[in-house]
Amino acid sequence: MKLSLLSLALTLSPAAATIYYAGVAESGGEFGVWSATSTPGTGLPGRFGVDYQFISEPAIDVHVDNNKVNLFRVAFLLERMCPLATGLGSTFNETHFALYKKAVDYITVTKKAYCILDPHNYMRYNNPSQQPMSGSVIGNVSDPTAATTAQFGAFWGELARRFRGNERVIFGLMNEPHDMPSKLLLANNQAAVDAIRAAAAFNLILAPGNSWTGGHSWTQGGAEASSQWLHLLRDPVKNTAIDIHEYLDVDYSGTHVGCKSEPATNLKDATAWLKAHNLKAFVTEFGASNATECLPMLSSMLDYMAANSEYIGWTAWAAGPLWGTSSPCCTDSSHWGSLEPGSKADDGGPGLYETVWEPVIQKKVPAKLQWTGPASIYGGLLLARN
Ligand SMILES: *[C@@H]1O[C@H](CO)[C@@H](O)[C@H](O)[C@H]1NC(C)=O
Ligand SMILES: *[C@@H]1O[C@H](CO)[C@@H](O)[C@H](O)[C@H]1NC(C)=O
Ligand SMILES: *[C@@H]1O[C@H](CO)[C@@H](O)[C@H](O)[C@H]1NC(C)=O
């Protein structure tokens, strides 16, 4: 694998600005655990197809066959994959794993697209009842109830062993770590990378930064800034990219209708850091509402990623089978639907699929993407989807 990556590096031009992977985040596997009263264990293990679900196969068909996208990021919850009774590690709930694998296989084997595995846990494990704030930070040695860094490594080693034969599977180490020491974040990322490679899995890895892995704040926060730490991550086979999230509203949270933030300005420092360390990035969450000022900004964001060679992949937030008229992004809690094909607002009006995906994002899906060969930081052969 090391050799084949090297030969890819020599035959492709890494300097050309190219998006190799483009698509949408599938949110739903992490649903059903919120508790207004903060009751631990709410929604665990949960009812598949009722409380949570990974994908809708017909919706994946639309995104691949009609929209010609080649990348999905599929969320799941660590507490469902690794039940609290056995803890975070290499013991999985096999029923849950089989359901998740079915979704990943549908995307990668049946549709021949690429799939990012997304433990949607904010670098926390044991109490998702008030995600993203609840639960013990993984590796917090002052918290006797916290899972350890070694357990996080063991979890990734096992997941990697199970998917190492599938070169279309990408390992997203963790969704949006926040409010934790960056040194610990690096240690956790490193434990995962080491365990994955020790399992003889050479798949592309996406490593998150701190502060919700926000692109705009990548270099902010002094000694705690992601830019002070993430380049120290070592991958023996050099197939790790940086995972960045970026929303266009006033506080970058992806909760507001209005857009404030010009993406080229916001990502400038992160891009310079990527360039300085010769790193590639995926933006695995971004989004904006259908407000008048948002649409051109979202378009600029997609142009910016296409124009800067540091960015090689993206997934917009979010589609998913259980959103109904609820919205994953950018509506001030209005029910304006999601990026799921056919999605509608609660007044029967067009949903974000029609108002944001089709007029803006779809237009920026590159005509040629990678459809064959291993996911890698060098990308691969670009082809139009039949
Ligand atoms: C494993 O997952 C299945 C499917 O969701 C569930 O029925 C079962 O209770 C889970 N087992 C544990 C120990 O969580
Ligand atoms: C680690 O655990 C201690 C003890 O529970 C707690 O005070 C501290 O805030 C935790 N650190 C993080 C980063 O959550
Ligand atoms: C955005 O979509 C919602 C839901 O269809 C709609 O109510 C709203 O008027 C739209 N906004 C604009 C600016 O078109």
Image (cartoon, rainbow, N blue to C red):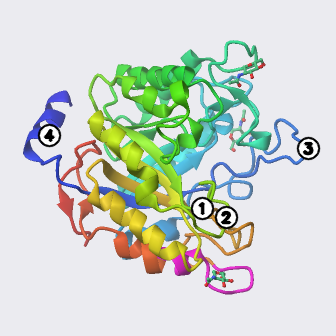
Q: CA distance from mark 3 to mark 4?
A: 52 Å
Element assignment for label 1: loop
Give the mark toward the camera: 1 or 3: 1
Label pair 4/1, CB-CB below 8 angstroms:
no
Label pair 1/2, CB-CB below 8 angstroms:
yes
Nearer-the-camera pick, 264 or 234: 264
Indicate the quadrant where residue 227 lies.
top left
Q: CA distance from mark 1 to mark 2?
A: 6 Å
Q: Callout 3, which amino acid?
A: Thr
Magenta residues? 344-357
Does 74 appear above or below 333?
Answer: above
Q: Which residue is mark 2?
A: 256
Nearer-the-camera pick, 8 or 212: 212
Mark 4 or 1, nearer chain start: 4
Nearer-the-camera pick, 215 or 345: 215
Q: CA distance from mark 4 to mark 1?
A: 37 Å
Q: Which residue is mark 3?
A: 37
**Crowding near the residue tagged with mark 2, few <14, some 14–19, many ≥20 C-alpha atoms within 10 Å:** many
Point 74% across, 41% down: residue: 45
